Amino acid sequence: MYRDHTVGVVVPAYNEEGFVGEVIDTMPRYVDRVYVIDDCSTDGTWEEIQRHADRRNRDSVTVHYDEDAVIEEKPMTADGGEPVTDGGVTTKRFDRCVVPIQHEENRGVGGAIKTGYKRALDDEIDVTAVMGGDGQMDPDILHKFLDPIVEDEADYAKGNRLLYRDYRQGMSKWRFFGNSILTFLTKISSGYWKTMDPQNGYTAISYYALENVGIDAMYEYYGYCNDLLVKLNAKGMRVADVAMPAVYGDEESSIKYRTYIRKVSGMLLKNYLWRLKTKYLVLDFHPLALFYLFGVGTVTLGMLGGMWSLYAKFVLGDALFVRAASSMMLFTMGSMFIMFAMLFDMQVNETKEVQIRE
């Protein structure tokens, strides 16, 4: 338990033999539940999870944290997770600290996290974090993701490796370039205009947000982080961007970038349209949705008109000036409507973002 809040950690793992065991061993002692999901690995990941889970469960203790000081430490008992009061501090003890879960078929990292999230909801965990099974996420900074939620500054906290130059030194130029493009696209799709590094999987979410964001419909491929941000924004949730250094080890990425870019880009476009409809037309009304639609439609007409003008000039031999001027006017007008819509979107979501720089 951390600052009177139960803490769960979801650890998705696919072919992480040699890494996931250390993730379990180094999990902070204040974590009440660790849901380790083997996503139908083809190596010895499942056996490693079971081995390290058994050892951790034998040695588990319940630790109560008050700010930075440990105020109480007692052996964990197998009482089914019933509330227990020790010295005026009410906590919930679980029969096991580490819960190994194995998928019968590969569902992707988003699917594995969804499984863990559902178990955390069943256990009524106050704050649920996600840490990869590859050991790239430093367990010593987990508290930075928990604090904004515990202090009621945010409903969801995520890592940001792009804020400082020193923090992104471990990131290749190609990865940084791709991440920057996805950051911009996700800003538009999600409405969180200050949030960066949307691909960062080191996150934490409150029970309230997890219960209300619609986990059943969460994207199951690698773009689950981007998808979740869109869903959070549509429900008016607050997001904290937590600065953290990039860490890369000896593990090999299983991402196929051609498939990744195609799938995630399509998902972002679909989610963008869904967010505009849900947030600004269904749950509430704001003219920015109409500004977006009118702007995109007018820009499209301007571009089509421009292409027709060129065709008429060089193929049909017609005059270019009138058609070209009209097309340029439509394009400019549509662009202005899009810019106004973005500005309104930024204003609406300005209070929904927090940046944790230290």
Image (spheres, rainbow, N blue to C red):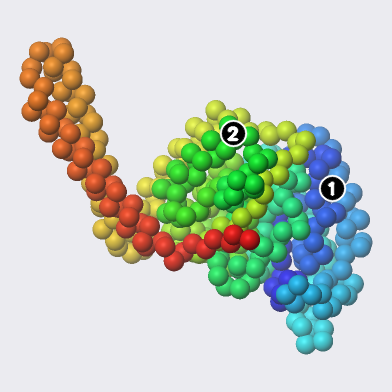
Tell me: residue 35, above or below residue 297: below
Closest to the observer, 253 or 83: 253
Q: Amino acid at mark 2?
A: Lys
Q: Secondary structure at mark 2?
A: helix
The answer to whether residue 225 is left or right of residue 65 is left
Closest to the observer, 164 or 44: 164
Residue 122 in sight = no
**Residue pictured at 54% horizontal, 48% vertical:** 198
**Residue pictured at 41% horizontal, 43% vertical:** 270
Residue 317 in sight = yes
Closest to the observer, 35 or 247: 247
Give the residue number, with chain letter if any, for mark 2: 173
> Looking at this rendering, what residue extends furthest in the front direction?
166
Within 10 angstroms of label 2, few (less than 14), some, or many (20 or more) residues?
Answer: few
Tell me: residue 203, above or below residue 271: below
The answer to whether residue 170 is left or right of residue 42 is left
Residue 211's image quarter?
A: bottom right
Q: Dividing the image into 4 quarters, which one contains the C terminus?
A: bottom right
Q: Amino acid at mark 1?
A: Gly
Of the residues under marks 1 and 2, which one precedes in the sequence? 1
> Looking at this rendering, what residue extends furthest in the bottom direction?
88
The answer to whether residue 345 is left or right of residue 167 is left
Give the residue number, with chain letter if any, for mark 1: 21
Q: Nearer the viewer, mark 1 or mark 2?
A: 2
Q: Which mark is residue 211?
A: none
Q: How many marks?
A: 2
